[in-house]
Image (spheres, grey):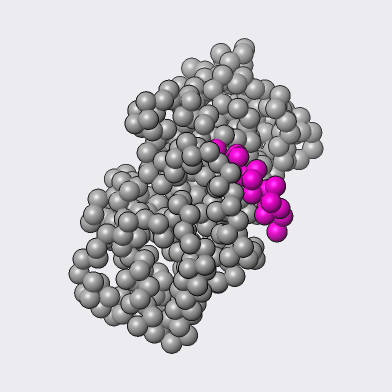
Amino acid sequence: MTSTDALDTLLAGYVAGGLPEPARVLVASHLEISERNRPFVRQLEAMAGAELETIEPIPIRHRDERLARIFALTADEPPRAPPSRHDPRLPDALARFLGRDLPDLRWRTLLPGVRECRLGETDGCEATLYWIRGGKPIPAHTHEGLELTLVLDGAFSDGEGRYGRGEIAIADDEVDHRPIAEPGTDCLCFAVTDAPLRLTGPIGRFFAPFMR
Amino acid sequence: MSIADPGRMASERDEFADLVERIARHRDREAFGRLFDHFTPRLEAYLIRLGSDAGSAEELAQEAMVTLWRKAALFDRTKSSVGTWLYRIARNRRIDAHRRNRDAALDPEEPLLQPSAPEDADEIIDARRREDKIRVALAVLPPEQIELVRLAFYSGLSHSQIAEQSGLPLGTVKSRIRLAFSRLRKALEDDGLTEF
């Protein structure tokens, strides 16, 4: 099973509207930044739209009242609030999810050059931002579930490959990966896990009691 | 995902797009009524299949149709069919409703979050060509994979529920679904379809 398969399935979950909120935000952010998977997502959406034509329709109740309610509305929806100004590295979908800008988040230092901001659990997934100085390792961990990492700035490499801005790394169960931020630009990542992290290695053991 | 008659679908697609444009230009109630009658029962059936009860399905479909009435001018026939556009709106409304429920449970004072945009910024793609090719691409999948894609995609069932229903081990379900989506993608890419 390759990570490409896992990514395609993730994209299909996004199209179907079935992802937990943090994963949905991660995919929406990816699509905002990167063009690569937009065509595939549009194709899957077209497939879902075509499926509406083959579905067995159910009878409409209160048709005339429902139409009258719609016609009573003014033509225009109230304009949406303009998107708030935020750090340009943040895609709009992620900025809305965070509800505040990067410097206003509660960051804490895990190691010199490694900061995290835990965003709590939503729909059974933990969301975390990592801010890693170029050249520093991201704390190694294994996963009891799936971890999705979207690179927002800089880049990192693990055993599987190199991930730059807009790319999603998917780490499956039993992967003990050791991501390292590339030298140069600080690496900013948005990570979503569907199970609590379990840190490994000497640093992990040291931090594990504080992590959970 | 059954293969509908492509000719009939193409003319219907044009007709629906014409109706949306009449709403955008003239607030044409007759045009809206026809789209309402066609799509509302389908959207409700789709939402129920995903697990909504009849009441919420009705509410969400109504919200989607309200969006069609108010935002008809944003529809672009070169980018998608009316069905696909409404599918995306209904999907986003369903996500918004889920978010409202969850946030209300956490903090009743929390003001409603921004609704999702009915349509994201999009690249220009010939919608008709895309939808025709998808039917061709789907035809390369073996029937059992199509069935799994259908279950994963439209039924709202989790992988473990699909495993339970089909009697297959969970790992098998997961890997077959992954394989199916990647074959679908490969079929689309071999066709040059992602080279827009």
Confirm whether the magenta stretch covers residue B185: yes
Confirm whether the magenta stretch covers residue B195: yes
Magenta stretch, main secondary structure, is: helix
Q: Quadrant of the C terminus of chain A?
A: top left
Residue positioned 71% across, 53% down in the render: B192
Q: Nearer the viewer, residue B1 or A110?
A: B1
Q: In the image, is B16 to the left or to the right of A113?
A: left
The x and y percentages for residue A32 are: 61, 54
The x and y percentages for residue A53 are: 41, 60
Residue positioned 45% across, 35% down in the render: A125
Q: Quadrant of the N terminus of chain A?
A: top right
Q: Nearer the viewer, residue A15 or A115?
A: A15
Q: Quadrant of residue A177?
A: top right
The x and y percentages for residue A154 are: 72, 41
The x and y percentages for residue B144 are: 47, 36
Residue positioned 34% across, 60% down in the render: B42
Q: Nearer the viewer, residue B21 or A88?
A: B21
Residue positioned 71% across, 37% down in the render: A163
Picture layout, residue B168 above or below residue B41: above
Q: Quadrant of residue A124?
A: top left
Give, as a single range, the part of the protein colored magenta: B180-196
